[in-house]
Amino acid sequence: MARSYQSDVAIVGGGIAGVVCALQLLDMGKSVALFEREGPERLGGSALEAFGGMFFVDSPEQRRMKIKDTPEQALADWRSFAEFPGGSIWPLMWARHLVERATPDGRDYLHGFGIRWLPVVMWVERGDRVAGNSVPRFHLTWGTSHHLITTLIKRLRAHPRANLASIHCGHRVTRFDRHAGRIAGCSGLTDTGEDFRAEAGAVVVAAGGIGGSIEQVRRLWRPVEGLALPKDLLLGTHPGADGMAVEAAGAAGAQVRNVGNMWNYAAGIRHPRAKWEGHGVSLIPPKSALWLDAHGRRLMPPMVSGFDTLDLVERVATAPLGVTWQVLNRRIALTELAASGADWNTALRDRRIIRFALDMLLGNRRLVDDLSGNCPDIVVADDVEGLAQKMKALRPEVRIDAAGLKAEIERFDATADAQSGDPQRQLIERLRGWRADRMRLVRPQRILDAKGGPLMAICERIVTRKSLGGIVTDLRSRALNEKDQPVPGLYAVGESAGFGGGGSHGLRGLEGTFLLSSVITARRAAEAIAKG
C-alpha cells in the first residue's frame, strides 16, 4: 500500500528555494510537507556547496563603499547582459521585479536571520562584447551559502509552528496529480521503492534544473548554434538535479521554456575526491596565467575571467578537443588560483576571520597544495620541457611541442610591462582598478621567472552548473500553461522556474542573481498561496 501524506502545501525539492518557501508558509500558518529526493545529508541542495555570492542593488554595503547604484541602472545592465529575445514578457517582468526587490526582499530578509556579507563588494561579469555590471554588486556571504542554507534549515526545524511542517527525504516526485481541474498533490517513489502520494491544496516545484545529468545537458544545451558538444564535460552539480520534476510539471500542463540556456563554467577540473561520477570543480581562472588551447597555442583574443562567463564557455566548447590549458607559476597560483564553492574556501565557510585574512594576505597555500598534489588535471614541473612532457602524458591526444610552448610563454612574459599593449595585460589593469580585484592579482609577473616557483599547467574543460530556463511563472510564482493562464494549484520557484518566468536571466546571469532569485521567487509563491 502506498504511503500517504496530507498538508496545505507540498514542496518538491529541499534546496534554498524550497526551504525559504516552507519558512514563509509556516509564518503564515500553513501546513507544509517538503519532499527531497536525496538523503537527509543533501537537504539544502546545491546551496550546500555554492560560493554564496548575492546580487544586491543600492545595498548598505555598496553605500559604505560609495558605490552609486539604482534599480534602473541595474535593470539596464541586466537586460543588456541577458539579450532577451523578442516576446520575453515574463522573463523581463521578473528581471524588473528582482532588481527592484533585491535588497528589501533578499538582503534585508536574510539579514533578519543573522546572515552577513563581506564589507568589500566584488565586481564580476563586467561584460565584453555586451555590457554587464556597470558597478560592483556581488556580495559574498560570510560563511558561504553553506552557512546561509544551514541557518535557514535550523530555523525551519525550530520554527514556532514546526509541528505544521514535515520533511520527507528519499522521496522522488514523478507526477503531479489532478483533482477537480486543479493540481491537488504529487506522487512518486521512495528510495526504498515504495509508492507514495501527497494530497495538498497547492504544490510548489523547487527541484532545481538539469546540471546534474550529462544526458540532459547533452540533449538540451546548445551553447553555439550547430555545435557538437565536447566529449569531456564535468558535473559541477549533484546528479539529483536531473530536471525530471520540471518535465513532470510540463506533463501536468505547465509551460516550460529556455531549458537549453545554461550557466556552465569554462575552467572545470576533476575533483580530487569525487563524490559522484564525473564530479568537477569550477576554478576561478587565474587572470595572469597564459590560457592555451589543447595543443599549447595561445587563445586569442585572450581569455580573462571576470567579464563574460558565457563567452569563455563557448570558446572552450569550440576549442580543439574541448580542452584548454592554463600555464602559470606557483607565485601566481598562490595569489590568483581559487575554486568556487564552500568546500574550497574553508576559512570563509567556517567564518574563521584570522585564517581568512591570512589567506587573503599570504595566498591560499592549502588550496594550491591540495589541488597541485591531488588533482589529476594539474601537472607541476621545474622547466618547460618537463611541463610539456607531463601535459602530453596527461592528454596523449594533444600535440604539444616543448619548444613551441616555451616560445608562447616567452612572448607573453615579454609583455609583463603594463604599457606593452598586450590585450590580456590591459584587461588585468582594468580589473586592478577595483580594490577587491586588486587584492587577488599579482603584480605583473613573468611565468618563467625563476623566483616564481615551479611551473603549473591546469587542464580545463566545461563543468556544468545551472539551468537558466524552466517553468514559466507569473509574478506570483504561479505556473502558467501554454495560453499564459495559471495551472490551478501549481507553483514553481528558483531554478525550476528558470529563476522566475521560465528564464529571467536570458542568456547570461550577472552572478549572485541565482541565490537572490531563488529567495524572492520562493517568497512570492508563499505569499500567493497564503492569500489564496
Image (spheres, rainbow, N blue to C red):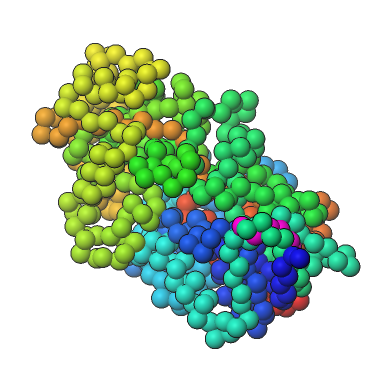
Residue 71 in picture, x, y percent from top left: 53, 61
Q: Is residue 502 magenta?
A: no
- 92 displayed left or right of 299: right
Is residue 418 shown to the viewer in this render? yes
Q: Which residues are magenta?
A: 186-191
Residue placed furthest toward the right: 180
Residue placed furthest toward the front: 1
Residue 76 in picture, x, y percent from top left: 55, 52
Residue 58 in picture, x, y percent from top left: 45, 65
- 152 displayed left or right of 194: left
- The quadrant holding residue 404 is top left
Residue placed furthest toward the bottom: 160
Give whichever of 188, 250 is nearer the camera: 188
Give whichever of 58, 90 is nearer the camera: 90
* Quadrant occupied by the C terminus: bottom right
- Above or below for 88 versus 155: above
For image coordinates 65% across by 35% down, the residue present is 219
